[in-house]
Structure formats: structure tokens, C-alpha cells
Image: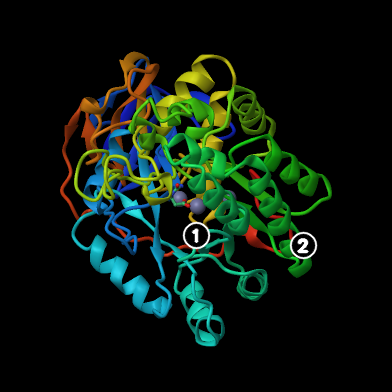
Amino acid sequence: MDFDLVIRNGTVATASDVFKADVGVKGGTVAALGSGLAAGREEIDAEGLLVLPGGVDGHVHFDQPTGDESVMADDFLSGTRSAAFGGTTTVLPFACQQKGQSLRAAVEDYHRRAAGKPLIDYAFHLIVTDPTEQVLGQELPALIRDGYTSFKIYMTYDALKLNDRQILEVLDIARSEGAMVMMHAENADCIAWLTERLERAGQTAPFFHGVSRPRVAEREATHRAISLAELVDVPILIVHVSGADAVEQIRWAQGRGLRIYAETCPQYLFLTADDLGGAGGDAGFEGAKCICSPPPRDAANQRVIWDGLTGGTFQLFSSDHAPFRFDGPGGKKVNGEKAPFRCVPNGIPGVETRLPLLFSEGVMKGRMELTKFVELTSTNPACMYGLHPRKGTIAVGSDADIAIWDPARKVTITNAILHHEVDYTPYEGIEVTGWPVVTLSRGEVVCRDGALLASPGRGAFLPCGLPAPARPKGAPAPALPF
Ligand code: URP
Ligand code: ZN
Ligand code: ZN
Ligand code: ZN
């Protein structure tokens, strides 16, 4: 036997090419691509199916303590299970520093949380909330060298946010160490001021969450993030971009030659402010299911996000899976069924539906090429976080992380068919065409036709390399596809 596994007669797609080929797997990596490959110990017939690099979801939250009574529903087992059933083979959850905590202690805590659980490979982004001298001078540089080469910083949320001076200090470390900085760009004071006014007026239904976080608050913070990055001369990634105003700032920066990267998420293509319920609160508390930050906008903004995805403004399409139950413990109702929006946990689930939604509405509806789909959902995230070419492509030598898709399968998304521990999906009832039918991680079948075939703990922790896109201007240009 030449191969451990041969995937035969499928149509392989990468970020650059679509071609008919057999894929030979040996020792967990792709050993050959070609026609008429020799026999494998195991064979999968992929005639009529697409053979894609497994998704790389560069933005998920698993088992992250929130600092209050709310509790995330997914841990590293259920979160990676849901990811795998949705065609994703690598996830990058966050290891969040609590204020006063050492960054190293935060990382160790998350490794304990993950221990024995992941079904697929994973890496960590750090969240830096307390950039003390010790953190900036020693812990962060040391962690970057240990393979934690990306981190997120926040411009909003009291427990997480940094001021501009702190942001500059942190960006400076990223520049000198070659790390990628992800920025949550919303203006905290605008949001706090609006929230107080809304509460005084009794406007506290879920709908007003969106009103309290208007596009201008995102636009201002996006512009400020870009300016701070320009001052330090370091690339940054603006995460979960929701609409036209932030997109305009990002295009302006990109047009000036700055290395500003951008990520968007399914909620900004498939949800609108209407999904947060009615202004009178008469739609009840249902709208809390769609409370996330930044909030979903409207149809016109959805169109701008689509244009940004197909036209090159966005490099990444991630889920921002932030799993809170609706009814269950620690969920959206943790502070009561009529809690003001300020007291509702922020975030929505989506790690399993990310790829099917974009595949169906993007590729099958002719909005984007299959190569673009692979680029946005797998190859670029792998590059952005220093995991390419081990992850994010199907090439000789790459890990055999593969999702086999049936492009003709019609599926109606309901929470009953999903594999997370959340008790709802915001995408209930949406019919999609195309679904991943087999997911392989390093050549092992993780799930096939709805059955889970892998054991918890088989997923490996991935130390990340220094991301090529994080190199400052003047340094050699990053590798393709950037
Ligand atoms: O509302 C959201 N997106 N919650 C998750 C945390 C974050 O800011 O990404
Ligand atoms: Zn965020
Ligand atoms: Zn997030
Ligand atoms: Zn690359």
C-alpha cells in the first residue's frame, strides 16, 4: 500500500486552483496529488464531490470565563465538534488575560481548559487586557516566541479595553516581535453615553443594543485604530467589521498603502437590526439571541460587506462563535427574561454554520468563485496567523485537513442538526445548498455523514509561526496569496 488513505475522483479546490485529482495521504499529511494514484489502505470515493482544505476559523470563543454570572455553552470538546461537523479543521480560540493576571498564567489556564478535549487542531490568540511593564517587557515577547503570535486588544468593554496610550505600547511590541494584532474597534465612551440615555428613557429591549452601538462609534474607533497603527508603522487586523462606515475607513487606509487587514462574520451578511426585535420590546426577549457586538446593521450594509468580501477589502471570514444559551444556565437570560440589553451576554453561535452559509449564498449563488471561498475561510486565516502552509491548503506536505463537500445537498439549518451546546441558532430555517459530508484532520476521519468518529483530545495544540502579513512596511512583501 502506498497510502494510508486515497480520496479518489473528487474535485480539489485551493485558493488558486480547481482541478480533478486523487489525494494520497500518508502519515497525516498530503503525500501526492494526481490521477490514478496507487491504492490506499482506506479509500474514499469523492466522485461528484468537492475536496476542500478544511476551514480555519480564526475567531472563536470556547470556555472563556466572562467575569460575571454568564457562562459559555461550548468548551473545547463541543466547540471543536461543532466546528468539525461544519467543515472546519483548525480553530483559534482566545486565551484572555484577566486584569491583574499574568499573561502566562492566562495561557496556562486555557491549556488546562482544553486538555483532553479538542477533536481538531487548535492554536490560541492572546487577549491582552492589562499591559503592565512586566507584560510588555517580558511576558508578551516570550509568549510570541513560544508560538502565541497573534493577540486581540479591545477599544470597548470595561473589563477588557485599553486606552490609546496602552494600544500604542502594545502595537510597538507587536512591531518589534512580528506578531499580528487583532483590534475590536468600537468607541467605548460613545456606547456608554448612549446606553445611559437609552436606559433613562426606558429603552432597554434587545433592539436598543443595536441603537447603543451605532455605525459611527465603530467608524471612529476603526479610524483611530488605523491611525495608531500608522503611527507605530505596524500592520493590524480589524475584526468583525459590520458595515459600510468601517469598510470605508479600511478602504481608505488600504488605498494609502497601509497594511490594514479586515475580518467579517456571517452575522453581518445574514442578520439585520430587525433580528434584535421591535423597538417597543413587543417582540419579546427573542432578539437577545442576536445580541452581538458590533451589532448586525441593515440590508444596504449587508451588500457592502458582500462587496468587501468579493472585492478584496476583507481577507478573512470567521465565525466569532460566542456561545451563550438562550434559556439555559448562564445564558442570555442570566439576568432575567426582561433584562436590559446592557446585562445580556454579547455574542452568537456560528462555528458550524459559517462555511455552509457562505458556500451556499456565495459560491452556489454565483457571488464568489470557489477559490475565493477557500481563500477567505481557510488559506488566508492560516497565513494571517502563521499556520500556512501546514494548514489552509491541499498541497504535498500539508496536513491532510480536508473537508469533502456535497455541493448539491440541500439542508435546512435548524438547531436540532447542529452539534454545539447552544440551544438555538440565529440561522434557524435558512435553506442552504452544499454541505460538508466528511471532515478529515491529519488524515483521520473526524466526522462522516453525521457520525462523530474521532476521540476527544486527539486535536493538537499548534504553536504559530510569525505571520508574514504582520511584517511592517519596508520589510519584504508577504507570501502569496497576500
Ligand atoms: O459580541 C461579541 N462579538 N462577543 C464576542 C466577543 C468579541 O468581542 O468578539
Ligand atoms: Zn470583539
Ligand atoms: Zn469575538
Ligand atoms: Zn501563506
How many angstroms separate mark 1 from mark 2 (CA)? 24 Å
Looking at the rendered structure, the kind of residue marked 2 is Glu
Residue 370 versus residue 357: which sits nearer the camera? Answer: 357
Dot 2 lies on which element? helix
Q: Mark 1 highlights which residue? A: 157
Regarding residue 272, the answer to whether it shows in the image is no
| 252 over 44 or under it: above or below | below
Q: Position of residue 178 (x, y in %)?
A: 61, 68
Image location (x, y in percent) of residue 266: 48, 33
Residue under pointer 2: 230
Query: Camera-side residue: 244 or 462?
Result: 244
Residue at x 51% of width, y 77% of height: 140
Q: Residue type at mark 1? A: Tyr
Some atom of ligand 2 lies within 8 Å of the CB belonging to the residue at label 2: no
Cβ of disc 1 within 8 Å of ligand 1?
Answer: yes
Residue 326 relative to residue 287: left or right: left
Q: Quadrant of the N terminus?
A: top left
Please indicate whether residue 476 sits to the left or right of residue 181 in the image. Answer: right
Q: Residue at x 33, y 14 (%)?
A: 409
Identify the mark nearer the N-term, 1 or 2: 1
Closest to the observer: 43 or 196?
196
The quadrant where residue 94 appears: bottom left
Say if 358 sits above or below 444 in the image: above
